[in-house]
Amino acid sequence: MWPAVVLFLIALGTISFTHYAYRWRNPKCKNGKLPPGSMGFPLIGETIQFFIPSYSLDTPPFIKKRVARYGKLFKTSLAGKKMVITTDPDISNYIFMEEGKSVHLWYLDSFDKFIGEGLINSTTSAYIHKYLKNLILNHVGNESLKEKLLSKIELIVNQALNTWSTQPSVEVKECTAIMVIELVLKEQLGYDSTKSTNNLVKMLSEFVKGLMSIPLNVPGTTYHRCMKNQKKVLQLMKDILRERQKSTEKPKGDFLDQLIDDVKKEEFMSEELAAVIMIALVFASFETVSTTLRVAMMFLTDKQAPLVVNELLEEHQTIINKREKVDSPLTWQEYKSMTFTPQVINETLRMTNSLPGIVRKANKDIHINGYVIPKDWIIIVVQVAIHMNPDKFKDPLSFNPWRWNDTGSNIVGKSFIPFGGGKRNCVGTEFFKVLMSVFLHVLVTKYSWTKVRGGQAVRSPGLSVKDGFHVKMSPKNTV
């Protein structure tokens, strides 16, 4: 009897699994037709293929193969989540415009746990995001940059590059991350101490790396290190917050002062949330800037670099030559007069795309191009595929800042989205551009540099650089 029972259970299990696998690979859609695509294996979907590294700045093979087979809108499953991926500029723009209506912001589950479950999708989420946008614009928006931050950014860039030039070599991302964190800690959070900056960079980097690498939140070494760093960073921010609260000094009117006032006034605000916002400010400031500056330095050290560097130098030397005093600080008018520098920044942003994509979640069924994106499915807009589209950008793998002389607003509006789109367009865009411009201004007018090692771009699926990018900086004899 027992052999028969075992055989029956095996048969039952096989039938059940086969049925489950069939339903997984062929999800139903009541209100229309799903986009074409493959759901991969049950539970893990196509996660393994998605994370296979590609050693290029080009669109990852995972995306390319599926676009060639299914088109620019296709379904898949990653880390147990049903998803639709798009590389179409018009569909992407539509998704951005539907923010707060048919779609909303979505993070990995690990991010939700960090910022507090229910915060993003709560009834007050729209109000909270509006609050955060205004908070950041008040302190790093155009007026603040023009009146206060521009000169301070130039000062810290000068200090940083001078320090780099005294060392045998520096890893660009690591050093720019320290530079930006010191700037934000000092100018926005009033924390004028460089003793913990290196450790803070390491903790933040490890923390974010952990969040991005454990989408299923499976306990393990990476997960526990990530959570450990989360607690350390969170505690540091709370200590900074409490130290200011106890201070008897005159209010500085900075980002931290406003947070402290809002903890008292706003019902949704707590000390815990204030500390999380502080972390978000620091991370958002350094991660994108340091990644982009590293890639920019790689481009400016490439075989074709001399032409770009020469035109940059000509633009910035002209600015200096027009001054009454050559060592005067950079002014807002001088920053706004730059023309080639923004093209270099745009081209770097077009080719960088450090994140795998821009993520949203459907609030309801979305009917688009004859297909339906079901409610609760995840939507990923793949920036790199849009930016590397040869129909919009000729020879897309070529670093060519001059292409922006002839790039129309229709291309910039939908096919160039380094800062997202719609209501969620990054509020720190101008801060980023100013910092990049000031860095390039100081770099090309005061320093020369040579590559020491590293520089192999890797997408897995986010952008990293194998072995980093190490350079030797040398001050120029004349300015």
Image (tube, rainbow, N blue to C red):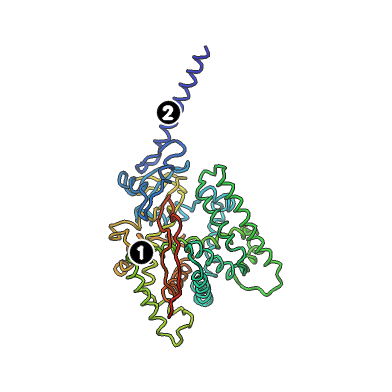
Q: Is residue 14 above or below residue 375?
A: above
Residue 243 image offset from top left, x and y in percent: 68, 65
Cα–Cα gap, marks 2 and 1: 53 Å
Q: Earlier in the sequence, mark 2 or mark 1?
A: 2
Q: Regarding mark 1 in the picture, which secondary structure is present there?
A: loop
The answer to whether residue 111 of the structure is visible from this angle is yes
Residue 235 image offset from top left, x and y in percent: 65, 57
Which residue type carries mark 1? Asp
Look at the numbered discs 2 and 1 and tell me whether their residues touch, using CB distance below 8 Å. Answer: no
Report crowding for label 1: few under 14, some 14 to 19, many 20 or more residues within 10 A (C-alpha): some
Residue 138 image offset from top left, x and y in percent: 54, 70
Q: Nearer the viewer, residue 216 or 368?
A: 216
User: What residue is shown at x 63% (from left), y 73% (from top)?
Assistant: 252
Q: Regarding mark 2 in the picture, which secondary structure is present there?
A: helix
Residue 53 image offset from top left, x and y in percent: 41, 48
User: What residue is shown at x 37% (from left), y 60% (from top)?
Assistant: 351
Q: Nearer the viewer, residue 415 or 58?
A: 58
Which residue type carries mark 2? Thr
Dividing the picture into quarters, in which one does residue 411 lie? bottom left
Report how many numbered discs are placed on residues in the image.
2
Where does label 1 land, which residue?
302
Q: Is residue 308 left or right of residue 105?
A: left
Q: Nearer the viewer, mark 2 or mark 1?
A: 1
> What number is the disc on residue 11?
none
Where does label 2 land, which residue?
18
Dividing the picture into quarters, in which one does residue 128 lie? bottom right
Q: Residue furthest top?
A: 1
Task: Please identify the quadrant where the C terminus is shown.
Answer: bottom left
Report crowding for label 2: few under 14, some 14 to 19, many 20 or more residues within 10 A (C-alpha): few
User: What residue is shown at x 49% (from left), y 80% (from top)?
Assistant: 329
User: What residue is shown at x 45% (from left), y 56% (from top)?
Assistant: 467
